[in-house]
Image: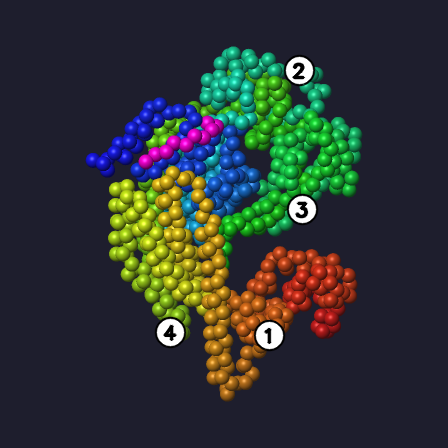
Amino acid sequence: MNDEIPILRSLAILLSFYLFPPSNYYLYFNSDFMTAKSILPETEMIASAVQFINSTASHIFLTGKAGTGKTTFLKNLAKRTHKSFVVVAPTGIAALNAGGVTIHSQFLFPFGMFVPDRSITHDIHQAGNYYTSDMLARKHPLNSARKQVLRSIDLLVIDEVSMLRADLLDAIDYRLKAARGNFRQPFGGVQLLLIGDLYQLPPVVKQEDEEQLKKYYNSAWFFDALALRQSDWVYIELDKIFRQTDDAFIRLLNNLRNNQVTLEDIAVLNEYHKSPAEIQNMREVITLTTHNYKADELNRNALQELKTPLHVLAAEVDGDFPESMFPVLARLELKEGAQIMFTKNDNDGKAYFNGKLATVTSIQDDEIEVSMAETHQPYTLKKEVWENKRYTINPTSQELDDEVVGTFEQYPIKLAWAITVHKSQGLTFDKAIIDVRQAFADGQVYVALSRLRSLEGLILRTRIDANVISTNQQVVSFSQQYHQPETLVARMQTKQLQFIEELISKTFEFDTLIKEIAYIKKTNDVSAAFEEDSMKPVLEQIHESLNAEIQNTQKFRKQLTELLQSNNKDQLLSRLKKGSEYYNHFLYSIVKLLVEHIELVKTRKRVKGYLTDITDLDQLIGKKREQVDKAQYLTQNILEGNHEFDFSHLAKEREKERYRLLEEIRTKVGLRLMKEQKESRGRKAKKNKKDEPSTYDITLTMLESGMTIETIAKERGLAPGTIEGHLAKAVSANRISILKFMSEQDVGTITHALKEMPEGFTSKDLFTKLGGKFGYGMLRAVMNHTGIQSTRQREESL
């Protein structure tokens, strides 16, 4: 009976809060008691979203009216979650703004519509630009790098999800399942965070795709995706509006949003209509209009009216940065007196923000001075750099990383006498001229008006007609059906317990690893790939070790689940701690064996496919160790009511351990290779003394094994400069890529300096110009790589 008291007390508290929820409290659960912590009402939904992300596996649709902080939430997410995640968006600009990548580039989708029907056997391309899961697997397979990224994540964030079509979300579902080898769970077991406002940007459906889409989906909206229908997910709406404070304006915007606009609302809006004569003399105010051609025409005419000289400022584009992602014009036309708008926030301070207006006062030799709107504060513009990134897995630390593949450098401004309503999304204005007489899309009037802080800043160029105000009824119905904030508290406890059960089940099983090894063995003839007997059984040894643990893991999972269900928290955490220590030690022994095998395979020829497969296996085992690391801490924090936890110390420990292991193994492999070469030279000496490897051949072999220049020098008893000289010679002979031992950044720095060197320069001149940062061997390597030679090199080549 005593055991039932905590449970009854919990149910009583839950019922009282469920029936009479106080507005300024939010509940944090554990398995056998509850605590209520007071938080500010305006952060309640944000706290709820963070808790669902960190302590459940539920998919989340995070929405909110304009100005409720969705963008800020995304920007702060990395600081608030322990989960590994990537950010994707439907378009290049949306991805750039979100700090992520496009959906198509991350998942390697072809353009066209995804058909969720595997029974189609004929070539569907004959009927249009369509593709199926089978076609993705056969004609558009994921490369290893992208597969590794998708295997490493716990959370997939999709921003501007209102633009995401249902079929594309189902294609994402298939890709995640295939990449992770998990077809049992929607999205391969990855949690989704879908961010956006359905009342703003709608999905685009081409006319030729409409009929095909209707065969499989109730609508094009993401919420009708088949995979999402099979999933557990929650609807969280950020309800505190930060942009507007005027209750009457907020009520009017809500009526527009919910298709409940009244004649009184229309009359209130039209009170702000101004005549062309009144508008003509207005300064420091922007026009929001419905069509691109209207905005372009207003800007072009206003620029032409200025009698000052025209200046054209070109952007600098480096690397992979497609035109579709250009955040501002690559060819910016400006005149003194032009009205401009900043297109991003000031990174260095608070001089400007995205949407801030200013007037150009001076243009001198690419130096632009502006006067800020309202304050008239002078400011000298600086160019900004936008980065195009791709997600990668660091080969050494096995951690998810992002790599800059291209940059775009330009002044962060655009002409801003006018912009379209579409491009105004996310911006805030104190004052704006609005022209929505020709509104053509659902929600367009709402988006335009919601850019303003208050009605006092509204200037209507044309009167608003009730006929142009519309909101998609499917969106309204969906929101009304799923927006149930009063149920979030009750669902949280259930989902947290489910999450811990799934965590235990997922962490302490090796089925995925065993299947991966079986696949590698099936697709690679390891017995024929290597002459050395010692290299053939490694995969089999790992396979046997994992198989031997199957029964132990089954018993351990059963034990933990029973302890969880019986609310025996202390014993559960104690068993988790001991089990985690055991399995970490067990997996580390496998990692050591596999990493040494990988380093040896790297030195062999004709094993590229096999090397890719075992590198993927190494990543999977690393992910498994990360799960084991976190299981104990996650369970403890959730049961104790904490919903934000920091695992950075675990990642740092693993990274240090990985670096130590690689250094130890690469040294070991390098010594083994030296011994093999010595024995090989001894055997061949009698037959042909000319075949004896040179000193620089030995250096190359050791580098190929993964050893660093410093380690090679130490093992061979030579100076690092000597080793660098060997490598410079190898570059000249096209025997090795310079990027094997130098970073792209260092090569770029030296190349840039080389191009600035005068005719007849010497290596010493270059060394001095670079401040002695690089040794002569490195300088010669880059000169050999670029073909730009010093005087001495040219003389030696003659």
Q: Amino acid at mark 3?
A: Glu
Give the CA separation, mark 3 to mark 2.
43 Å
What is the number of the mark on residue 275? 2
Residue drawn 46% across the image and 67% down it: 665
Q: Are marks 1 and 3 in contact (CB under 8 Å)?
A: no
Q: Is residue 768 visible?
A: yes
Q: Is label 3 in contact with label 2 (beta carbons under 8 Å)?
A: no
Vertical side of 245 occupied by 782: above or below: below
Query: Magenta stretch: residue 37 in it?
Result: yes
For marks 3 and 4 on the same chain, the one whose residue lies earlier in the sequence = 3
10 Å neighbourhood of mark 1: few (<14), some, or many (≥20)?
few
Residue 765 drawn at (x, y percent): 75, 64
Q: Earlier in the sequence, mark 2 or mark 4?
A: 2
User: How many angstroms separate mark 1 from mark 4 (CA)?
Assistant: 33 Å
Q: Nearer the viewer, mark 2 or mark 4?
A: 4
Q: Amino acid at mark 1?
A: Leu
- Looking at numbered disc 4 in the image, what kind of residue is underneath it? Asp
Per the image, the residue denoted by label 3 is: 316
**Is 574 a magenta residue?**
no
**Lower sequence index among marks 3 and 2:** 2
In what element is the residue under mark 3?
Answer: strand
Looking at numbered disc 2 in the image, what kind of residue is underneath it? Ser
Provide the residue designation for mark 4.
Answer: 533
Label pair 1/2, CB-CB below 8 angstroms: no
Residue 776 sits in which quadrant? bottom right
Q: Residue at x 23, y 36 (%)?
A: 2
| Residue interval drawn in magenta | 33-42
How far apart in space, not on screen, are marks 1 and 3 (Cα)?
44 Å
Q: Where's residue 444, x and y in %?
A: 53, 25
Q: Are marks 2 and 4 in contact (CB under 8 Å)?
A: no
What is the number of the mark on residue 718? Answer: 1
